[in-house]
Amino acid sequence: MAKQKRKIVKPVYVTKAERLKAKKKSKPMSRELRIGLIAGAAVLALAVILFAVLARAGSLPVKGGVVQKEANWIVSNLAESGARYYKLGEVEGIAGFERREETLRFDPNESDFWFRPTDPDSQVKQYYITGVKTAPAQTVEKVYPDFVVQYGEERVTQAKTASVAGREAMYFIVDSAYETEEGGVRHEQALIMYIPAIRSASVMLHVTLDVTEEKPALSEDALLALAEEIAGRIVPEGA
């Protein structure tokens, strides 16, 4: 068997100047610098913890996936991602109306309120209350164009502000018409209002009325008076 040739590795000579230069580059970290870096990391960690705590401040406890709340609380998830539920207020119905166990919310931990008249001849067909995670102006800016597209510009009033139950709300009014199963036309009037709530959120109030020859559409002042009565039975959180 032929002998394998060994590879000869020549030593590399490092000058004294190069050794000193390398030693300077790898100089141990000073005690002050180590303390500064540790303190900076601690401050950053504390900031993250405080941000998480403050973000959840005031949110409702959740046990077994169920928010702990009362039946008349307006509860909404105000988190941008995930879930953090907040109480926006409490609701009591006005005289002549009773709450129906119906909901439009997909999240069972959020709450909404349908009130329908006990008098079948009432012109007010129903009113609906729920929470919205954005402020009134921001919400109107988002939803108003959709109403204009759906009902037509001539049937939707301009969005306005009004003082309702001591709070500066935003609202608009919609006049609509629907074909009935009998081939007739049914007219309705609706007031859509957004009332300020905590954490830059809103409480939405949607009132629907029947409009007939015997019961013509209400004036704007009459609708606002009705909204004042309903909103007066909403106790906002933090009030």
Image (spheres, grey):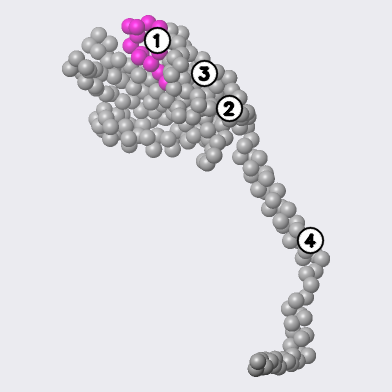
Does 42 sit left or right of 226 as displayed?
Answer: right
Query: How much space separates mark 1 and mark 2, taking CA atoms?
Result: 31 Å
**Picture coordinates of residue 71, whole percent (x, y):** 55, 18
Which residue is under mark 4?
Answer: 35
- Quadrant hosting residue 100: top left
The residue beneath circle 1 is: 117
Q: Mark 3 Cα within 10 Å, few/some/many (few <14, many 20+)?
A: many
Q: Is residue 162 visible?
A: no
Pick whichever of labels 3 and 4 is earlier in the sequence.
4
Under mark 3, the amino acid is Val
Q: Secondary structure at mark 4?
A: helix
Q: Is residue 101 visible?
A: yes
Amino acid carrying mark 2 in the image = Val
Disc 4/disc 2 C-alpha distance (Å): 45 Å
Crowd tier of the residue under label 1, counting other residues whose Cα lies within 10 Å: few below 14, some 14–19, many 20 or above: some
Label 2, residues with CA under 10 Å away: few <14, some 14-19, many ≥20: few
Tag 4: amino acid: Ile
Q: Position of residue 82 (x, y in %)?
A: 54, 39
**Cα–Cα span, label 3 and label 4:** 55 Å
Tell me the quarter of the image containing the C terminus.
top right
Q: Which residues are magenta?
A: 116-128
Give the residue at x 52% y 41%. 81
Give the numbered dot on residue 66. 2
Identified at 62% across, 32% down, the residue is 58
Which image quarter: residue 152?
A: top left
